[in-house]
Image (tube, rainbow, N blue to C red):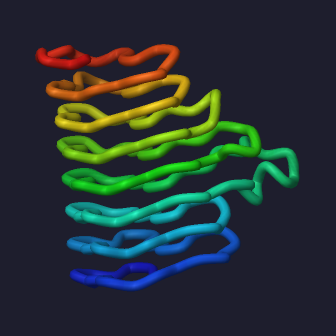
Amino acid sequence: MSGCKAVRIHNGVVGGFNYGGVFYEGECRFGLVEEIRVAGGTYHGIRMEGTLHVVRRNQVSGIDNNPDGLTGGNRTTVGIFLAGSGNRVLDNDISEIGIQGGQGHGILMNASDKSFVESNRVTNSVATGAGIQLGHSRDCIVSANRVINTDLGIGAYNAGAFVYRDNFTLGCQSPYANGIDAGNNR
């Protein structure tokens, strides 16, 4: 979908896709994706561009083989990707992202100022990926998430201040990077 406003996608299954399972692009606003099972596809499980979206209570698994990677591109595969400010990623289960190589991120938010990532569970992202990664984003809160078996648990690159609190990582080579530890992280 492109240029959409206030679109709700609720309760369904998406699988076997090539490029993106649920894909909002351009200047979409106020989107809601909830209670969707996305499995067995490539590139991004859920991708939303624009502002003020909510992605909640979804299951995303088995996302692999970014098409760019097949032609020599960056091979970045993502379970849930958001680009734009004021977004919320809440209470999702994400597993087995980018296992066949390249970078695999459970949740990646880019240019997502003033956004929240809360109460998500991420397991088994690829060895060079992150459970939760913020890029070019500032003034974000990452709280009450669980990340197991990823290279980087929760972190950021080229980002302004973001705060993480009440998160738990296990089996992550680097549990936390480049944020403000507001306490109670394990």
Depth check, front residue: 135 or 17: 17
Quarter holding the N terminus? bottom left
Rendered residue at 35%/25% (across/down): 169
Which residue is outermost to the right?
71
Q: Quadrant of residue 62?
A: bottom right
Regarding residue 158, the answer to whether it shows in the image is no
Q: Quadrant of residue 170?
A: top left
Q: Quadrant of residue 119?
A: top left
Left/right of residue 10 with respect to residue 116 in the rendered view:
right
Rendered residue at 44%/52% (across/down): 94
Which residue is outermost to the left?
183
Depth check, front residue: 133 or 94: 94
Report the number of numbered marks. 0
Regarding residue 76, the answer to whether it shows in the image is yes
Q: Is residue 140 above or below residue 11?
A: above
Q: Is residue 54 above or below residue 24?
A: above
Rendered residue at 24%/44% (across/down): 117
Left/right of residue 70 with respect to residue 53 in the rendered view:
right
Residue 182 in the image, given as x and y percentages of width and height: 12, 17
Residue 27 in the image, given as x and y percentages of width and height: 36, 70
Left/right of residue 53 with respect to residue 95 in the rendered view:
left
Quarter holding the C terminus? top left
Residue 50 in the image, given as x and y percentages of width and height: 33, 63
Residue 118 in the image, given as x and y percentages of width and height: 20, 44
